[in-house]
Image (cartoon, helix red, strand yellow):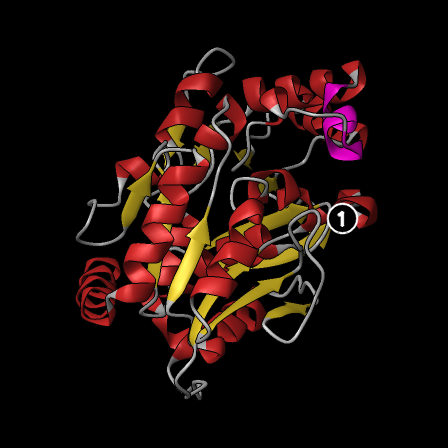
Amino acid sequence: MPVISILVIIEAEIATTHLIEQVLKACEREGIRYKVQFLDKLTNADFTPNIVPLFIRCGDPRAHVWAQTLVDACYPYLFYIDDNFWRIVGNSALAEYYRHPTIRQSLEFIVSNARAVVTNSNQLARFLSQFSKRVTVLPTFFDFSLIEDVQHQSDDRVRIGFAGSPSRADDLELISPLINPILEKFPQVVFEFAGVLPNGIQPGERTLFFPHTQDYKSYIRFQAERNWSIGLAPLIDHEANRSKTDNKYREYGACRCVGIYSNIPPYSDVVTHSKTGLLVDNSETAWLDALTDLIADPQKRAEMSQAAFEDVR
């Protein structure tokens, strides 16, 4: 069997890069080998005749320079992307960065000239097709070995959780008005947030906050250990969010947690409403009704969490 060596080029270690490494590790039995190099450490010596470069989410002008060099040398490379950087909304530093003409030019050159562009989202694949006809969709997955030996929290509380980066604060606006009413109505409920708190919510005895972690294995083991009964997956409806990967569904399902999801892609593409999760409209009433329904019905939670687990498995 021929050995194929992948040079994984990243700007920083994030959950996405760890997930792609899981794919590559799983492919070792097929003759795939890989090494990771940071973009700012990249040198000519990293490129040998048997190496296939794989850029992950790189939009930095340095990536543009390397891509141009590879194109000029007729040296093929691959590109993986899991966010629609062209459609990020708001005025955050991240949004401003990806709106900069130099970054846009870098992204579009790298995508247009890649031998293959890989994503996990059909929505994002359709968007990227304006730059390249060589876009392929990688099926989503979950590595159950990450949580095989996890020790779960065990008590009578109904834990409702969300984990994500600080950039998800806007999406949490959908559920922040519901937290105090739910806590008042259901004394057994505890909300847990990791990495980001909804605006206007302070940590307390029944609203817990945990720091963000970049390491995917630690992140997913944390979710499993906390033993959430209900997982939150709010997404404001815009093109960038519709192009995201369905990570939350697979993570919640694997951890036997019932998810409540905004009724837009990517979740509406994978969740069977009232069987493997709840799909809800982005209104305060819809989210309040969904939370109230699941908190009050432990049997329904048990049936749906098992169905989601089996589906993800």
| Residue topped by disc 1 | 45
Question: x%, y% of residue 192?
Answer: 56, 67
Q: Nearer the viewer, residue 153 or 9?
A: 153
Q: Nearer the viewer, residue 45 or 138?
A: 138
Question: x%, y% of residue 141?
Answer: 34, 55
Q: Is residue 32 visible?
A: no
The residue drawn where x is 44% and y is 29% is 242
Q: In this picture, is 178 found above or below 74?
A: below
Q: In this picture, is 17 found above or below 194?
A: above
Residue type at the position of mark 1: Ala
Q: Nearer the viewer, residue 139 or 196?
A: 196
Look at the image and give the residue range highlighted in magenta: 92-99
Q: In this picture, is 120 found above or below 65?
A: below
Image quadrant where residue 36 sits? bottom right
Image quadrant where residue 257 sits? bottom left
Q: In this picture, is 293 found above or below 124?
A: below
Instruction: Tell me the quadrant of the picture where the N terminus can be found.
Output: bottom left
Question: Residue 94 lies in magenta, yes or no?
Answer: yes
Horizontal arrangement in the rendering, residue 21 relative to residue 97 (left or right):
left
